[in-house]
């Protein structure tokens, strides 16, 4: 009985020989099938590049006017993207309408923008999709003078008639502020007053503080510098929308926000009573051709930046996928259903470029398996047939030589016949085949050696001068023996 040491040695020797044989077969396989492998690789790479090209490293994003909440929010998004190795280029604009127009232009490199809900019609905006609602944008109305306490003037909605004769800024045409102000006026049955002006946000703030205008409509976030400045000014009053619920019913994109007494400034007790405000929402809109990986990155940014609790929003309230006004991106739908893709999971642990690379490789594995698996399954059989064909061609050459010997044997050409056999034997000796076909090669060489022996022996089976064969007992004429041939060295 073999010792334990000997058994271990034989086991590892067997494993080594098996691995060596597999490696030899693999090298032979690559040498023989490399054109197919190269073609297969090109097909898979082509499918991968066409179906899932790598994401861009630079993305253009429209924000809004100077000092607006959109500009501030855009900077926070740019910081988030910079950490992921992506440059988010912020493009200042005049407002929502310009953002929509540029996103609708298929030749414009702009790919994403913040747009207020209710600013534009969604009918003529093909090619634009939504990644969800990311924030409230309250509709503010500040005015100079004493509070409107009378019944007839209580609330902006009831006091609009009073302000029609005043100098009020309703925002630049094309901006979200302008669109919301006009809509509220028309819902109340009014047109803009003759002295209404169109000032950008920062200019409107200076104008009302300097007494150049009597009031200002502004649609902006609570944290924007313009709103903060107006809230701190003790000479200004804030309007309330007592019929806010009615407006929200008439325009579903509008939201009602409740502000408790003193919430803006407890020390000053501002506002002096509970008020209701109307708010629109900020939509994160994209060009529908945006790379899916960049879309997921925007959704992750929205979750991290806009998902926190704020003055008006609860924690986790945004991003929201209700009342988006625009068709949702399939990526947003996927994200909404909590079917987080591999990329989102990887982003929690890896840099963006590495996470996307891993995701890209995994994505390419699927078409590789679909296309390559049947082909790879067929390759071993193809390779075996290819090696067998090499052996068969040599057998065919040997058979051809024998046919020639039978038909036209010439004793004077004996050396030439033997040389041709030597060439066949050399070809059989140098043929590259797998080990499982080695026996076929040795059988071929044995067959070649048999023909050589037939030529070297004294009696030539390939030269029959006269023969009469009889069947079932018939006489057979004797075969005349050819001259004896000396064995060929």
Image (cartoon, rainbow, N blue to C red):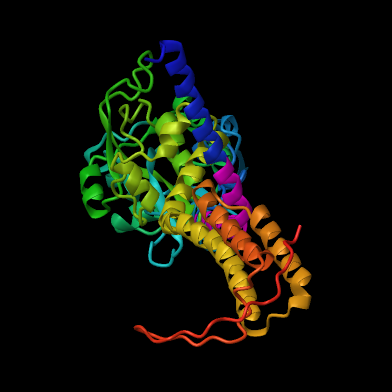
In this view, 272 is above or below 69: above
Identify the image quadrant of residue 4: top left
In this view, 177 is above or below 427: above
Span highlighted in magenta in the image: 24-51
Q: Is residue 150 magenta?
A: no
Between 133 and 288, the one nearer to me in the picture: 288
Q: Quadrant of the N terminus?
A: top left
Observer able to see residue 71: no
Q: 405 left or right of 164?
A: right
In this view, 280 is above or below 236: below
Q: Position of residue 191 (x, y in %)?
A: 38, 59
In this view, 242 is above or below 267: below
Between 129 and 341, the one nearer to me in the picture: 341
Counting every numbered tag in the picture gives: 0
Q: Quadrant of the C terminus?
A: bottom right
- Residue at 31 percent of width and 41 percent of height: 339
Q: Position of residue 257 (x, y in %)?
A: 28, 35
Q: 423 left or right of 368?
A: right
């Amino acid at each position: 009985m073999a010792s334990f040491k000997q058994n271990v040695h034989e086991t590892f020797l067997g494993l080594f020989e098996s691995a060596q044989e597999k490696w030899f077969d693999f090298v032979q396989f690559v040498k023989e099938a490399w054109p197919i492998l190269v073609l297969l690789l090109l097909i898979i790479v082509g499918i991968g590049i066409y179906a899932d090209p790598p994401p861009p490293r630079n993305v253009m994003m429209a924000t809004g006017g100077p000092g607006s909440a959109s500009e501030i929010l855009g900077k926070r998004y740019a910081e988030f993207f910079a950490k992921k190795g992506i440059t988010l280029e912020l493009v200042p604009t005049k407002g929502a309408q310009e953002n929509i127009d540029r996103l609708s232009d298929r030749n414009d490199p702009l790919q994403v923008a913040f747009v207020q809900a209710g600013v534009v019609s969604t009918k003529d905006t093909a090619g634009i999709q939504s990644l969800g609602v990311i924030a409230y944008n309250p509709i503010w109305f500040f005015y100079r003078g004493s509070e409107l306490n009378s019944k007839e003037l209580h609330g902006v909605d009831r006091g609009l008639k009073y302000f029609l004769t005043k100098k009020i800024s309703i925002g630049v045409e094309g901006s979200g502020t302008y669109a919301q102000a006009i809509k509220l006026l028309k819902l109340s049955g009014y047109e803009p007053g003759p002295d209404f002006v169109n000032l950008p946000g920062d200019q409107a703030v200076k104008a009302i503080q300097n007494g150049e205008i009597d009031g200002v409509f502004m649609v902006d976030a609570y944290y924007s510098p313009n709103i903060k400045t107006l809230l701190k000014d003790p000479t200004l009053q804030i309007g309330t929308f007592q019929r806010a619920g009615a407006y929200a019913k008439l325009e579903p994109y509008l939201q009602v926000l409740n502000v408790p007494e003193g919430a803006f400034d407890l020390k000053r007790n501002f506002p002096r009573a509970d008020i209701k405000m109307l708010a629109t929402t900020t939509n994160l809109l994209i060009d529908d051709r945006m790379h899916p990986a960049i879309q997921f990155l925007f959704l992750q940014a929205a979750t991290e930046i806009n998902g926190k609790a704020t003055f008006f929003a609860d924690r986790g309230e945004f991003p929201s996928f209700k009342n988006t006004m625009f068709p949702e991106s399939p990526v947003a739908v996927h994200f909404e259903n909590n079917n987080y893709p591999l990329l989102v999971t990887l982003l929690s642990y890896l840099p963006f470029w590495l996470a996307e690379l891993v995701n890209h490789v995994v994505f390419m594995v699927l078409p590789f398996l679909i296309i390559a698996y049947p082909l790879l399954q067929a390759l071993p059989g193809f390779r075996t047939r290819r090696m067998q064909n090499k052996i068969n061609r040599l057998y065919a050459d040997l058979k051809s030589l024998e046919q020639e010997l039978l038909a036209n044997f010439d004793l004077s050409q004996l050396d030439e016949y033997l040389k041709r056999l030597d060439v066949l034997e050399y070809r059989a000796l140098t043929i590259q085949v797998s080990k499982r076909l080695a026996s076929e090669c040795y059988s071929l060489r044995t067959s070649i050696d048999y023909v050589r022996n037939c030529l070297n022996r004294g009696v030539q089976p390939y030269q029959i001068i006269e023969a009469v064969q009889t069947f079932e007992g018939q006489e057979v004429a004797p075969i005349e023996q050819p001259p004896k041939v000396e064995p060929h060295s």
